[in-house]
Image: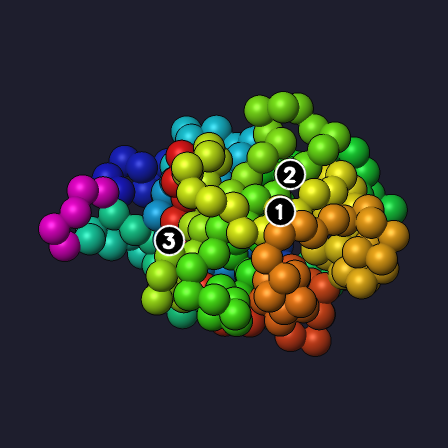
Amino acid sequence: MTDSENEVLTRKSGYGQFCPVSIAAEVLAEKWTLLVLRELLAGSSRFNDIQRGVPLMSATLLSQRLRTLEHWGLIERIQEPGARGHSYCLTEAGMALGPIIDNIGVWGLKYMRQTTFADQNLDPSLLMWDMRRWIRPESFPCDRAVIMITVIDVQKRMRNYWLVKDTDEAVLDLCLEDPGFDVDLTITSDIETLTRVWMGDMPLDSALRNRTIQCEGSAVLRMSVYDWIGLNPFAHPSSVRPKITPGRVRV
């Protein structure tokens, strides 16, 4: 970051109060900032991965927010050896925000539930990215698996997704186009039901029993779904920061 950029950020008008809440809000209360931090805390470190967690945020604005977080010492930009580009790493100050952001999420799920599942907040691409992040591929009963998820009530271009676990890797990749592999398990549902189950608002066994979620294919994957499905950490607010599994997006 250049000296002139640092000067602009430092001179930015604030609330004009010495209160620590005011000082913190000057850094954290800008639109998108908490969501960018959420993505970093959830394990995203590359620009494109962070952006997939905030798909409605422009690349320009994301770059600005990352520069701001770097300026205030919440993240560090790290050049990756032998690779183009860089990654972002939370500093001690950034990591310290983890419990705060977790508690904001728990509060939102408890007291803002009436808007959590509103139509305008149901994004299948974001849901798939979140599922890829928290599903436990190490709990799959097979070394290699391809799971196709079909969301029946969204635009055609956002309807099908593939989760791929490669042989001998505890890694799950998200494919936005058909990777050309045989599908072992197909999960079909509408966006609201899938989101409610993922967020712990509806039990998975209820959705399977009434067939609002349908699983077809490999018997061992169907029988073990409760072991590997993972669920969003806010579905279990007493433990909102489980171990994150790495993965990639294949476009």
Task: Give the percent coordinates (x, y) of residue 20.
Answer: 59, 62
Quarter that holds the C terminus: top left
Residue at 62 percent across and 52 percent down: it is: 217
Q: Is residue 199 magenta?
A: no
- Asked whether residue 19 appears in the rendered view, the answer is no
Which residue bears the numbered disc 2? 150
Which residue is tagged 3?
45
Q: Which residues are drawn in magenta?
A: 81-85
Give whichever of discs 1 and 3 has the lower sequence position.
3
On-image quarter of the N terminus: top left
Are the residues tagged 2 and 3 within 8 Å (C-beta)? Answer: no
Q: Residue furthest left?
A: 82
Task: Work out how far the residue at label 1 is from the one at label 3, CA to CA, in angstroms.
Answer: 30 Å
Secondary structure category for the residue under label 1: strand
* Quarter-of-image position of residue 159: top right
Coloring scheme of the render?
rainbow
Q: Per the image, is 82 magenta? A: yes
Mark 2 neighbour density, 10 Å: few (under 14) some (14–19) many (20 or more): many
- Calculate the distance from the C-alpha at mark 1 to the C-alpha at mark 2: 7 Å
Query: Mark 1 Cα within 10 Å, few/some/many (few <14, many 20+)?
Result: some
- Residue identified by numbered label 1: 186
The residue lying toward the viewer, choosing from 63 and 87, is 87
Q: Please tell me which residue is depicted at 46% across the width and 33% down the height of the picture.
A: 177
Would you say the residues marked 1 and 2 are in contact, meaning their CB atoms lie under 8 Å apart?
Answer: yes
Residue 185 visible? The answer is: yes
Q: CA distance from mark 2 to mark 3?
A: 28 Å
